[in-house]
Amino acid sequence: QYCPNAGQSAITALYCSPGFFCINGSHVPAPPDGVTGYRCVAGTYCPTGTSKVLKCPVGTYNPNTESWNITACVPCTPGKACTQPGLAAPNADCQAGFYCPKGQIVPHPAAYVCPLGMTCPTGSSSPIHCPRGFFTRIVGQTSCLKCPAGYYCNVHDLCPCGNFTAPKLCPAGYYCPPGTEIAHQYPCPVGTFSIAVGIKYKANCTKCPAGK
């Protein structure tokens, strides 16, 4: 509260203005001096009649001054983390191998480990699918591996055990060098064939025998 007049006997309903705090004998509702009170700084909020600032909780931040309601504290930006109370801006990037939807309190949220078939570089707000011809072997990756020779990695032919790309054996009649994107990308040339699956290079295709 504040006391605006000399000789006051009561301060009923004389509350410090929203967005400010009043201490040490304030005589105005919005003290600017930093001694009897001050405006609420970024990262905090000050309801009507407060004598101290209230910090925005972890997982939020507030870039504005003179805020008076906790609703001024907004969820942490996607791809970032707000790891301590009273922040004017997010203070951490999402850690590589994880992704951070809005409102995260740590840069490595256990609920958001980068899933199989995807990558999460530093600052990811959502996982990124590996492109055609690439895959990942384990979760929490920051880069994709090139599909191995003898296999293909088709982003539209996902593993039935989950929503991710996994290497699949090259079919008979085709060969699959490293990075092959689809099953029928590299047919054995005219005059050759292959009854085996998983062959790696054109040289592995067998020449048609004499008389056939």
Image (spheres, helix red, strand yellow):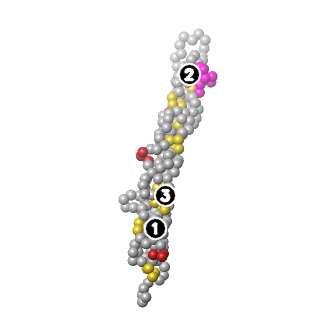
Q: Amino acid at mark 2?
A: Cys
Displayed quadrant of residue 8: top right
Displayed quadrant of residue 193: bottom left
The label nearer to you, 1 versus 2, is 1
Q: Amino acid at mark 1?
A: Ala
Residue designated by label 1: 149
Residue designated by label 2: 22
Image coords of residue 30 (percent x, y): 60, 24
Q: Amino acid at mark 3?
A: Cys
Q: Is residue 114 above or below residue 6?
A: below
Q: Give the extent of the magenta segment.
A: 28-39
In front here: 38 or 196? 196
Name the side, left or right, on which 7 lies relative to 211. right
Residue designated by label 3: 144
Image coords of residue 82 (percent x, y): 50, 39
Residue found at the very far left of the displayed protein: 161
Kindly report the distance in space between the C-alpha atoms of the residues bearing marks 1 and 2: 72 Å
Q: Residue at left 53%, top 22%?
A: 51
Q: Residue at left 57%, top 16%?
A: 25
